[in-house]
Amino acid sequence: MKKILFSVLVILISSNLVFSQSSNNFPIPTGSAYVLGGANSYYKAGAYLTMGNSNFGGFPYLGFNSLLTTSSSTNNLFSPYYTSGGAGLVIRGDAAGSGLHFMQGNYGSSQNPIDFTTFYEALTLNPNGNFGINNNNPNYKLQVSNGAIAIDNGVTNSLPNCFRAGQYLTIGHTSTGNSPYFSFNAVLNSNSANTFTPTYAAGSGLVILGEAGASGLHFRKINYGGSSSAVDITSSSVTEVFTINSGGQIGINTPTGYNFGTLALAVEGKIGAREVIVSANTPIADYVFDKDYKLKSLDSLETYIEKNKHLPNIPSAQDVKDANNTINLGDMNNKLLEKIEELTLYVIQLKKENEEIKKAIEEKKN
């Protein structure tokens, strides 16, 4: 750290820096206990920049609108050059290390000195090379506390404005469509279209695309086909494998613009499952066995079928078509159970009739 500050010192001296060892070649605030020519000497460049070393803490520093006016064995007081006070910045080094601490102080509207311990540490570079923003003890290469990081829309200077983690993950914002995104093995290009190129061409890419001004998410899989060429996120080689629309409805392999209607989940394709549990919205069809249940006669059932071409209380082919070729699985299962129970009653009736016929035949034989 001291080598770095010394290099800066040499540059400043070569630029006609005013250096004071034993005489006041530049103004010092009235009442200052600062000692010239001793351990607390400093360099001054222009109106607002100083460079020196403190007694308390023994750290080197660069001061912007901040002059070390008192450095005793117990505290360090800084004063502003600007007559109306304002804000000051002190870049403090570590006394026995290589860290840097960007400290911001608020002088208010006066030139009164303030204690360095009241300065706010906005940026930290610790000896391990970790940066901290609003964090004076960062454990990662960049650690941000109590704040957000923003990046601009789209791309500039042929490079995407994005965060990148490792080789394959990027987080950014598109210029066309104004959409935030996460991408895996897909890097946004610099042209006006939303095209992505792979880091690994032999694989596939996945872009999780948000909606501008809405809360939907679109998981789009890119098939590069072994090519490193850019692929438009809206092209036919891109499949939307998973969708969450702004209404919270979920689609799997549903095409763009799919009409969910009242569906909470839509799947375009087959579903494999070990168990499917469907909640019943209507009573189970055991009511068929109640004494008051009106079972149609077989003759009336035959007449109904000949006229309507479907069983009573079962939706027709036209009904299913009018419902966008969908059926309610729970209701349909219950209706089929109703028909099974009715069929059971018909079988019982036929058995009784058959036994009566048998009995009558036996009686005639005798």
Image (cartoon, helix red, strand yellow):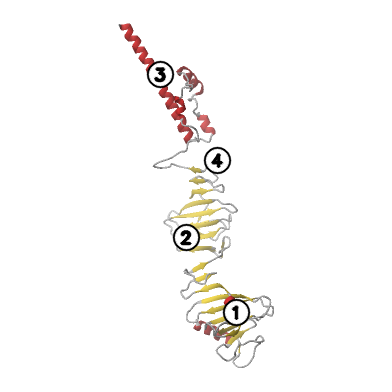
Q: How many marks do you count on the picture? A: 4
Sequence-first disc among 4 and 2? 2
Is residue 291 or residue 322 the one in the foreground?
Answer: 291
Mark closer to the observer (4, 2):
4
Q: Residues within 10 Å of mark 3 (few under 14, many from 20)?
A: few
Position in image of residue 9 (x %, y %): 55, 85
Sequence-first disc among 1 and 3? 1
Is residue 179 or residue 140 the one in the foreground?
Answer: 140
- Residue 169 visible, this angle: yes
Whether residue 46 sits left or right of residue 54 in the image: it is right
Q: CA distance from mark 4 to mark 3?
A: 43 Å
Sequence-first disc among 3 and 2? 2
Position in image of residue 12 (x %, y %): 58, 85
- Give the residue at x 59% y 80%: 63
Q: Which residue is mark 4?
A: 262
| Residue 115, label in figure | 1
Q: Which residue is mark 3?
A: 349
Give the answer, above or below, for where 221 lies relative to 129.
above
Q: Which residue is mark 2?
A: 169
Sequence-first disc among 1 and 2? 1
Secondary element at tag 1 = strand
The amino acid beneath tag 3 is Gln
Position in image of residue 284 (x %, y %): 46, 31
Q: CA distance from mark 4 to mark 1?
A: 64 Å
- Give the residue at x 55% y 50%: 216
The amino acid beneath tag 1 is Asp
Mark closer to the observer (4, 3):
3
The amino acid beneath tag 2 is Leu
